Amino acid sequence: MDPAHTRRVTLIVPCWNAGPHLRPLLDSLLAQTEREPVIVLVDDRSDDGSAEFARVHGGSRIEVLVNEQRLGIAGNWNRCAELVATPYFTLAHMDDVYEPGYAVALADALDGDPRAGAAHCIATAIDAAGATLDAPQERYKLRAWRGLEGADRAEVYRRLLRANFVAAPSVMWRRTAFRAIGGFDPRLRFALDWDAALRLLLAGHGLRGVPRALVRYRRHAASATAGLGAGGERYREEAAVGAQAHAAGIAAGLLARTARRSRAAIDHLLVDVLLDLESGARDAARARLRFAREELPGAAKDPALTLVAAAVRCGRPGRFALRAAFDAFLALRAPRRHSM
């Protein structure tokens, strides 16, 4: 890669079988208003022609590299980060779309705050066709942005531990800070972005929020069942990351010793239960609840899980009641103010 010492930003795409969503992503990166960003695609041995398409579509403006062997998600993300020579970089996810002013806005935020190890922005969820989605997760994330600009590092840590409101494709990393925390944990498959952001804060760096919707990230139809399809590994991993971050936060003075443990894994599972019900997958919803009771610490006696299980037993009326209750639940749980 060209060291590009005069440029601020690298937009680097970890790619594997991107399919039809690669074109709109690359078009959005080529349209960035940042002065000559470095654009790179690192292909993890795709067999759908992704690398060839990127070479033709991007021409001389996009450098395409192909890994000698398949590295997987964490491995390819870290490989991408290792290639960066500019002060800042974004892992541009292969099926998302970036607004033209994304790179300028986040790089300017990092320029203006030397303590920040990363910056992120609001991300809007879209479906496979590009239509905006109004999902409960998105309303929670937007509510979590309230007062974020004035928050100190401890409050950002508490809020992030409560639930991951930072959309991974929106994050622009300061290269030196990312390398100082050791990059992404290669043992993780699902929560590696959440874990890295928490470790960044633990290491003393700030996490700067830019309250503008500058990324559209794609939620695929299969995403609602991804956790269960992996045998519940996603929820187990989130629970483990949350427990480790809880202990580390107390040790670092970012959490009070009486702070409650993160229930992010349980809340994520309950959202997926609601989505299962609304798609007619009642058996999948029951299986998730059974998994939670048997596998997730604290879930067996969790009041919210008990109420959701009762709604599932009630069939269609329970589904409608659950949607209304869940909207209120998210609104109540979302932070309303910041305090030390």
Image (spheres, rainbow, N blue to C red):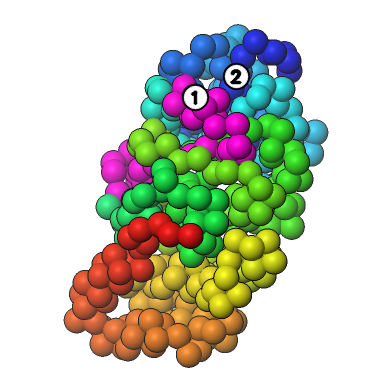
Q: Nearer the viewer, residue 10 or 17?
A: 10
Looking at the image, residue 250 sits to the left or right of residue 126; the answer is: right
Asked if one can make out residue 13 in the rendered structure from this viewpoint, the answer is no
Q: Which mark is residue 8?
A: 2
Looking at the image, residue 169 sits to the left or right of residue 39; the answer is: left
Q: Is residue 75 above or below residue 51?
A: below
Count of numbered labels shown in the rendering: 2
Which element is circle 1 on?
Answer: helix
Q: Residue 252, how many percent across, how many down?
A: 68, 61
Which residue is disc 1 drawn over? 108
Q: Residue at x 67, y 22 (%)?
A: 86
Q: Quadrant of residue 175?
A: top right
Q: Which mark is residue 263?
A: none
The image quadrant where one finds the N terminus is: top right
Q: Is residue 330 above or below residue 131?
A: below
Q: Which of the marked residues, 2 or 1, is nearer the chain's N terminus?
A: 2
Q: Which residues are magenta?
A: 104-133
Looking at the image, residue 178 sits to the left or right of residue 218; the answer is: right
Q: Amino acid at mark 2?
A: Arg
Q: Residues within 10 Å of mark 2 (few under 14, many from 20)?
A: many
Q: Quadrant of residue 14?
A: top right
For marks 2 and 1, give the one nearer the viewer.
1
Q: Residue at x 28, y 41 (%)?
A: 131
Distance from Cα at disc 2 to Cα at disc 1? 10 Å
Asked if one can make out residue 113 in the rendered structure from this viewpoint, the answer is yes
Q: Nearer the viewer, residue 272 or 21?
A: 272
Q: Residue 236, how many percent across, how many down?
A: 61, 71
Q: Residue 147, how many percent across, how many down?
A: 36, 49
